[in-house]
Structures are given as C-alpha cells and as structure tokens.
Image (cartoon, rainbow, N blue to C red):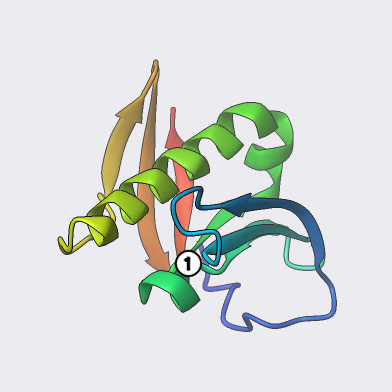
C-alpha cells in the first residue's frame, strides 16, 4: 500500500473514540476517522509511548469495527504493560487474535494494521 499517511495532522478528521489508560489517566489515545485519506488512525501512541501510531484501512474498519477496535485495544494493552514494566516494546509484524491473523507494517508515520485472509 502506498504511504498515504505522511501528514499526521489534518483538518479532515473525526474523533470516533477515546481510550484511556486506567492506571495512568493522562495517557489517552484517540481513534480518528480520516475519510479523505480512506483510513482510521490512532493519535496518542507516539506522544505517550514514543512509537508509531496505528492506521487501519477504512474498508476493514467499517466492515469489522467491533473486531478492529478490539485489536487496537489489545495492542494498546500490550504497549502499556511493557511501559509499566520498563520493558522495550516493538510491534509484532504478524499476530493472531481469535480466529483472525493480522499484519503490522510500517507506512510513513504509522504502523498499518491489516488482516490476513
């Protein structure tokens, strides 16, 4: 997929959800819809954890919004736990959750989350 996500700040965005860390309420991550770019992204992972935010293609997120928000929450829990334990965190390029397999690959300023079919 081409690097569509190089402009992290754009006026063409809608906050659709906010996820807060229960143990550290100052750590808030937003899920944004960027229809002009055809993507949903997180905002806050880079700020709080010094790693790239996540992008999910619009078609995948809209078709499976409950599943995909669960996947993003799972990743956020892993990041927060590693930080809490003072352990390094790196995105796994491939992982499984439930019956589905996922990929995370670098794409500009983001890690692009896709589902393997």
**Image spot of residue 62 (x, y percent):** 74, 37
Residue 35 can be seen, yes or no: no
Residue drawn at (60%, 72%), measured in percent from left and top? 4
50 sits left or right of 70 in the view: left
Q: Residue furthest top?
A: 99
Residue extending farthest left: 87
Q: Looking at this view, is 54 or 79 the one in front?
A: 79
| Residue position marked by numbered label 1 in the rendering | 45
User: In front here: 70 or 49?
Assistant: 49
On the question of residue 66 being in view, the answer is yes
- For this view, does 71 lie left or right of residue 32? left
> Can you tell which quarter of the image residue 80 is in?
bottom left
Q: Provide residue 95's location: percent of width, then percent of height.
A: 29, 36
Q: How many numbered marks appear?
A: 1
Q: Residue at x 46, y 36 (%)?
A: 115
Q: Quadrant of the C terminus?
A: top left
Residue 57: give x, y in percent of width and height. Answer: 62, 51
- Mark 1 secondary-structure assignment: helix
Please say if 109 is above or below 90: below
Q: Callout 1: few (<14), some (14-19), or many (20+) C-alpha neighbours within 10 Å?
A: some
Q: Position of residue 70 (x, y in %)?
A: 54, 33
Image-based side of 82 in relation to 51, left or right: left
Q: Nearer the viewer, residue 56 or 22?
A: 22
Q: Is residue 46 above or below residue 65?
A: below
Q: Is residue 1 above or below residue 61?
A: below
Residue at figure coordinates x 68%, y 33% from the top left:
65
């Amino acid at each position: 997929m081409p690097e569509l996500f190089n402009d992290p700040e754009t006026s063409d965005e809608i906050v659709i959800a906010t996820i807060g860390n229960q143990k550290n309420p100052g750590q808030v991550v937003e899920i944004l819809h960027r229809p002009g770019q055809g993507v949903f992204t997180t905002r806050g992972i880079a700020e709080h954890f010094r790693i790239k935010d996540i992008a999910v293609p619009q078609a995948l997120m809209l078709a499976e919004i409950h599943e995909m928000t669960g996947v993003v929450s799972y990743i956020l829990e892993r990041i927060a736990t590693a930080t809490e334990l003072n352990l390094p965190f790196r995105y796994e390029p491939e992982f499984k959750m439930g019956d589905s397999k996922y990929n995370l690959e670098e794409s500009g300023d983001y890690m692009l989350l896709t589902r393997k079919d």
